Structure formats: C-alpha cells, structure tokens
Amino acid sequence: MKKYSSVEKMAPVGFVLLGAGSVGGGVFHQSLLTRDVYCKVICDKAMEKVMALEDPRRRFEIVSTEGELADALNAGKVAVCEDAQLAAIAPGVEVFFDASTAVDSASRTIESAMCSGKHVVMMNAEADAVFGPWFWHLAQKYGVAYTSSDGDQPAVIARLVEELRFYGLDFVMAGNIKGFLDRYTDPVKIIPEADKRFLDHKMCSSFTDGTKLCVEMSIVANALGCSVVQPGMLGPKMNETIELFDHFPLSDLWTPGQAPLVDYVLGARPQGGVFAVGYTDDAYQRRMLNWFPSETGPGPFYVFTRPYHLIHFETMRTVLEVARGHRSLMAPRFGMRTEVICYAKKALEPGHLLDGPGGFASYGLIENSDSGLPAGFPIILSDGVKLRRAVSRDQRVTLDDIDISTVSPDALESWRRACKIGTQNV
C-alpha cells in the first residue's frame, strides 16, 4: 500500500516505540503507511512480540549496546531491544512514543528520553494520569513537547474542545461515550470478551470495570482544568448522546466563568465516541444553531460529538505535530486536579496484595484532588501493594490503609512530585 500524507513533503520524522503489544503493534504498522514517518527503534521486554512485527519494508536488528544501536540506525534498520533506557537515548531520533503499560519504570525512561532531546507522545494512559504533571514539568525543563496521543479519547476530546472554542462557545463539559460497565468484573470473567478483541485479559477488565474510563477522564481534567461532580462521575444511561440534556441539569452544574466538568454517558450512540458541551448566550448564534439540521441541543447548551476514536490510525498525526511544531496538544497544564483512587471490588483482609487496574481486588474512581477527603491511594500504583487494614466492598482505599513500604519507591516519588506541581503555562 502506498504511504499517504495530507501535508507537503518535509523532512522525515523518526520515533522510538516503547511497547510492542496490541497498541504498539498498531502504531508500528501505521508508520509503514504514513509518509515521512519512520519507526527507528522498538523496545519491549517480550522480544518475541517485537520480532512478530517485522515487515519486508523494514528490516529489524536486535541490539544491546549503544554502539550496536548506532550501527543499526546508520544502516537504515529498525533497532530492536529490551532495554528501555537504551531506546530512550537513541541518537538522531526526534520522538519517543510510549505505547507500553509500564508504570514503575516510566519516570526514569521518560526523563531519559526528554534529556536526550526527544519529544514524548503518550499512549500509556496510566503513567500519563499518575505522573503527567511531573512529566510536563520535565518537558518544560528540557524544552521538548509532551502530549497524549491522537487516537485515544483524551486527545480526541482535546481536538473537539478546540473546535467548539474556535466557534466562540464556552467549554462546559467533556465526556466519553461508554458502552458497558461492570465494576466487579475481573480478568477471568472477562476472558470471552477479551479474546474476541485480542486484548490482554487484565487490560480488558480495566476497560469494563470503569477504571480506564476514569483514567482517561482524569487526563482530560488535568489538561483542560476540569473537575467532577462526584467520585466516579454521574454517567447516566441513555440511547442517544443528545439525550444528555435530559439527564445533566447543566444550568445547576455549571455557570459562565466556572471550571468545566468531565463525565460520561452510558450505552448511548455513537458507541466509542466522545462528546463536548459548549455554551453561548449569543442570540444570533443560538438562532442559527436552532435552525441548522444537526441536533446539537436546545440552547444555550450544545453538544458536539465525534463518533469514533481510532487508536493507532491517528497516532502519526501527533508524532508529526510534536516533531515539526513542538506542540503539546494534551498536557496536564493544570496540575493534578483529579486522581483515580482505589476502591475495593470485594472485602479485603489485612495483608491482601492489591493487583492494580483491571485486577481482582479493586476498581478506580476519578475524584477531585481538593475533595477534602483523607488522601486516597491511586489505583495505578497499587499492583503488588499490601493492605495493612481491612477494607470492605466498595470502600475507598486510603494511604493509611496500605503498607507504603510495598509501593515502588520510584513510582511513589514521581507521584508525590506530580501532586506538588501547580498550574503551568495555561
């Protein structure tokens, strides 16, 4: 298939790809189809996943040292390795694309990439959500771009919000159109659905129990200065997104000049899409919006939707944009306005080991960081962490409930740094 680009011919852009799973594999494949973009390095601990991506159009060479890495790149081959630190410092490569699920090692890897002058594109939503403000701080320090990637809901929402603001509307709410929700699913219950979609069982469980939804909306909130109405958001069920005006009392929830909100709707069409609500009191604009055939709302609130997000199909746009324009589309400029906190899926006894997003022990709910509640424990840091106190089903897990010594020291320190970062360059 011929490579395609919607822009004029410019210097090609190279990127390092961290993660060769279902998302990373798609990102690499898209780079074969988009003109002027080349994946130069692929890194994953599971080398068999990396080698399964090899394509006649791009030959692979396994490397383990800086010299071997440089030689492979000079020969025009894709350098493949297991060492994320080695990949992060690859010479002459402009962009570092994180499509992994790594959390504990993320801070060290991302800082190494930035220190070597690479712009960072994130499709690792968990690391983006829990460390994002710290990564954004580092991006300012090293003079590089940092952004969530097009193709995932947060960046798709950012484009939609840009659009409604361009129209002159105030931004009121952004949200996800969620198809199904079961807080108590687990990696075993979800196997039939996960296998249909060729997804990791635990990852699919995190989609279904709502943790991933909350992670994505936390990224949006921290980038666009939003808050939530309540922990976990409202998430009313409906058939069509236009019905949200019957379920969200927007005039009560938001007034002009107030910070926008994030939320979601459940079971509505278009499934897999996103929405953003805008407001205008301009009489001419309201009259025209009421006359136009598209259904956007009764006014003064209007809903705009994008009926899809296409994951890897859209990623090369971000790679090109950060390399050529140094633009950070979706960065946590507002600091840690929200977090995704651990809630128990079942009664848990002291000594129980939590097992992270999508596991058997807990689900995550988005909360405002200034809620006034005792400090909650982020679910993203919870894999392998030991409880020191009993927690009942649906109970919020606090920092006092866990044995802090069982949390990854690097991850804990990066999270604490992220929490201290305030609003920057808004």
Image (cartoon, rainbow, N blue to C red):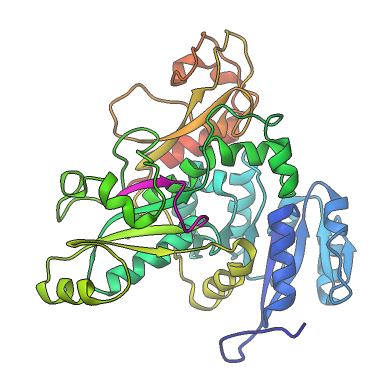
Quadrant in the rendering for residue 336: top left
| Residue 323 on image: x %, y % | 56, 74
Considering only vertical position in the picture, is 170 above or below 13? above
- Residue at 75% of width from left, 75% of height from top? 32
The residue range painted magenta reads 260-272
| Residue 262 on image: x %, y % | 35, 48
- Residue at 62% of width from left, 67% of height from top? 95
Q: Can you see residue 225?
A: no
State the quadrant of the C terminus: bottom left
- Residue at 52% of width from left, 74% of height from top? 321
Quadrant in the rendering for residue 218: top left
State the quadrant of the N terminus: bottom right
| Residue 90 on image: x %, y % | 72, 64
| Relative horizontal placement of residue 166, taking residue 14 as reference (left or right) | left
The outermost residue toward the left is 283
The outermost residue toward the bottom is 8
- Residue at 54% of width from left, 10% of height from top? 388
Number of numbered tags placed on the structure image: 0
Q: Which of 240/40 is in front? A: 240
| Residue 83 on image: x %, y % | 78, 50
Q: Can you see residue 152?
A: yes
> Is residue 86 a member of the stretch shown in magenta?
no
Q: Which of 38/110 is in front? A: 38
| Relative horizontal placement of residue 99, taking residue 21 as reference (left or right) | left
> Is residue 268 a member of the stretch shown in magenta?
yes
Q: Which of 130/167 is in front? A: 167
